[in-house]
Structure formats: C-alpha cells, structure tokens
Image (cartoon, rainbow, N blue to C red):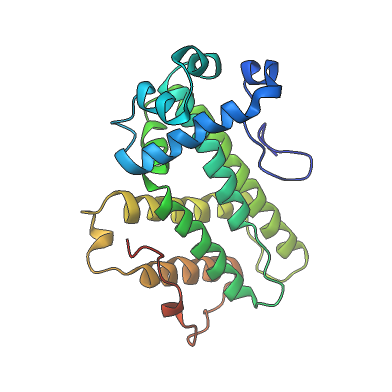
Amino acid sequence: MSQLAGENGAFPRLITPRRAAAAQDGQTYDAIVQAARELIRGVGYTSLTVEDVRRRAGVSRATFYFYFRNRTHLLIHAGNLVMAELYEVAGRHYPDKDEFSRIVLANVEYLRVWQRERELLGNLFALALIDPEVQEFYARCRIEFERRISGRIARLVAQQRIPDVNPDLLAATLSSMVEFAAYRFFVMPNDVIRGGVSFPDLVKVLSENWYRAVYGRRPPVSYDYSQHALHDGA
C-alpha cells in the first residue's frame, strides 16, 4: 500500500528519527501523545499549548522537543493513532452478517471514532487544506483507506459478484462520501446536514448509498437503524 502500510496490511505508527534513537523510552513518547489527545478532546487544538501537554504528560520542555518539533508535528503523531483506529474498525470482519449489515456496522464504528475524536480529526481535515506537512500525512492516510476499499471492490468484480466498475474511482468516491459526511456532522454543528438529521439517519443514507454503488441493488428495507446510537448523545 502506501508508505504507512505494514507487511501484514496493518496501519503502523509513525516513527520519527528521534524516537527511533530513543526506542527504549517509548513510554515517554506515548505519554506525550496521549496527553495531547486528551487535551485536544477537552480544550480543542486551537487552545492547545506545549506547556499544557508537557505538564499533563509529566515531562520537561526539553523532553517534549526531543520528540516533537512543534504542535503540528505532535498533532500528526496523535492523528496517526486515531487514523490507525479508524482503519482497524472500518476493516473489521463480521462473518455472521450479510453484505449489507457489514457495510452498516463498518460505517457505525468509523463514525463513532469520528464522534469521540472530532476535535483532532476535524483539525487534521481542515489543516490538510492549507498546511503542506499535514496535507502530506493526510493524503497518505487517505490512500491507505482507499487502496483497501479498492482491493475489496476489485475482488468482487473478479468474482462477478458485482457489476464491472473502476475500483479505484469507486473507492475514492465512497471514502470521500463517508469522510466528508463525518466532518460535516460532527465538526460543523450549524451545517445543513445537522438540521434534524439523527445519527441513525446519517448511517442509513451512507450505508444504503454505499450498497447501491457497489452491488447495484436496492438495500433491504427492514434494517433497524435505531439500534445504532451514539454513546454520549452528541
């Protein structure tokens, strides 16, 4: 896959030269990144300071800058962990479920991570439009997701289980649909998508359109979307 892909198809963590040189002290790195994630959830990225992070992590400023150049560098590393979680939940297998239910469950779990990490993911999404370093990181993450989706679509085409289609184009379209819908639903509360739209409504629209686009069939009408609720009611 991309530069972020591991041999087993997993979504590996970013490793900086400084961290590699101090691999024996990985707990310090983890503590700083975890502190950043917690603070971003609490106060937002725009209010985040190096001083806040290093105090919460219990490290000195010198230690912080040993691992990270600045806030943006830290955001990318914190974001990589969240992207890895998105990659994992979106790729879970549900062997006891039918094709449509698997699509719904993948979307639900992906969106729940967006709900919990909306401050971090929202800032990554927005900064990727203007910051070259974030843009390069986010692009590699997007490629990772799209290549896995494309591979699955290509296998379905080869097995003649779905109509012939360009797997890369369809994967990019579907991935963008869910990603941008998540951004608008969780990060832009005054957006039109939040006007009376419930979380089950969002899951329904995304999953049914994904199913139609891939399988070329109408989705089942009896699926109970109300069973999928957000954990904190956001």
- Residue furthest to the top: 62
Q: Determine the residue positioned at 67% across, 59% down.
A: 153
Question: Foreground: 42 or 212?
Answer: 42
- Residue furthest to the front: 58
Q: Determine the residue positioned at 59% across, 44% down.
A: 84
Question: Foreground: 230 or 176?
Answer: 230
Q: Quadrant of the C terminus?
A: bottom left
Q: Determine the residue positioned at 45% across, 65% down.
A: 206
Q: Position of residue 201 (x, y in %)?
A: 36, 72
Taking the image as shown, residue 228 lies to the left or right of residue 144, namely left
Q: Position of residue 123 (x, y in %)?
A: 37, 37
Question: Foreground: 223 or 92?
Answer: 92
In the rendered view, would you say 136 is above or below 95? above
Taking the image as shown, residue 160 lies to the left or right of residue 67, namely right
Q: Quadrant of the N terminus?
A: top right
Q: Determine the residue positioned at 54% across, 43% down.
A: 83
Question: Foreground: 160 or 227?
Answer: 227
Q: How many marks?
A: 0
**Which of the 4 image quarters holds residue 5?**
top right
In the rendered view, would you say 70 is above or below 153? above
- Residue furthest to the bottom: 222
Q: Position of residue 24 (x, y in %)?
A: 71, 23
Q: Position of residue 196 (x, y in %)?
A: 23, 69
Taking the image as shown, residue 159 lies to the left or right of residue 41, namely right
